[in-house]
């Protein structure tokens, strides 16, 4: 059986440790997408990125600076990778962490920023947690 390029990508998913350019210029790498953890709005995909420059220390990227990067990642990275066929998530969560981390495991040594977006067509609509 031959898979189309779209079907193959949907099965294989994006490649880990993929560098992504963001408006702030901070270094960001794609880490993973979590597709099987239901969110408050139903089917939710979580796009997780490592951004070592985030944090609260002097000279670090603040949450306010990272918020525009997360919106950009939703719009330009996550939405184009959502399926056109089959179940489409109603919500996307973008997370940035300063170090790789295990999904769902709290670690006080790691700084993490999150934003949630409803998806309407090709638009990301910010939702307050």
Image (cartoon, rainbow, N blue to C red):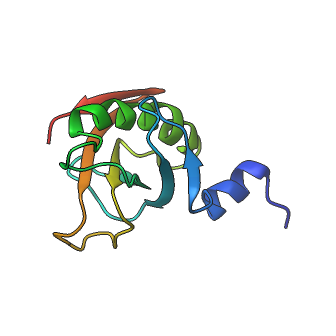
Image x and y of residue 33, in percent: 46, 58
Q: Residue at x 51, y 54 (%)?
A: 30
Q: Residue at x 25, y 55 (%)?
A: 112
Q: Residue at x 27, y 42 (%)?
A: 59
Relative to 128, does residue 53 appear above or below in the rendering? Answer: below
| Residue that sits furthest to the right in the current view | 2
Q: Nearer the viewer, residue 7 or 86?
A: 7
Quadrant containing the N terminus is bottom right
Image x and y of residue 106, in percent: 19, 71
Q: Quadrant of residue 16?
A: bottom right
Quadrant containing the C terminus is top left
Q: Quadrant of residue 38?
A: bottom left
Q: Nearer the viewer, residue 23 or 80?
A: 23
Image x and y of residue 42, in percent: 28, 51
Horizontal side, residue 2 vs residue 127: left or right: right
Q: How many marks?
A: 0
Q: Residue at x 43, y 60 (%)?
A: 35
Image x and y of residue 37, in percent: 32, 64
| Residue that sits furthest to the front in the current view | 58
Horizontal side, residue 99 vs residue 18: left or right: left
Q: Quadrant of residue 11?
A: bottom right
């Amino acid at each position: 059986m031959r898979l189309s390029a779209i079907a193959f990508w949907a099965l294989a998913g994006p490649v880990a440790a993929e560098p992504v350019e963001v408006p702030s210029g901070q270094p960001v790498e794609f880490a993973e997408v979590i597709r099987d953890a239901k969110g408050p709005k139903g089917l939710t995909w979580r796009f997780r990125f490592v951004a070592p420059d985030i944090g609260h220390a002097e000279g670090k990227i603040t949450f306010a600076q990272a918020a525009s990067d997360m919106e950009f990642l939703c719009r330009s990275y996550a939405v184009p990778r959502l399926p056109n066929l089959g179940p489409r998530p109603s919500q996307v969560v973008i997370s940035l962490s300063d170090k790789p981390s295990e999904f769902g495991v709290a670690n006080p040594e790691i700084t993490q920023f999150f934003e949630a977006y409803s998806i309407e067509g090709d638009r990301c609509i910010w939702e307050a947690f």
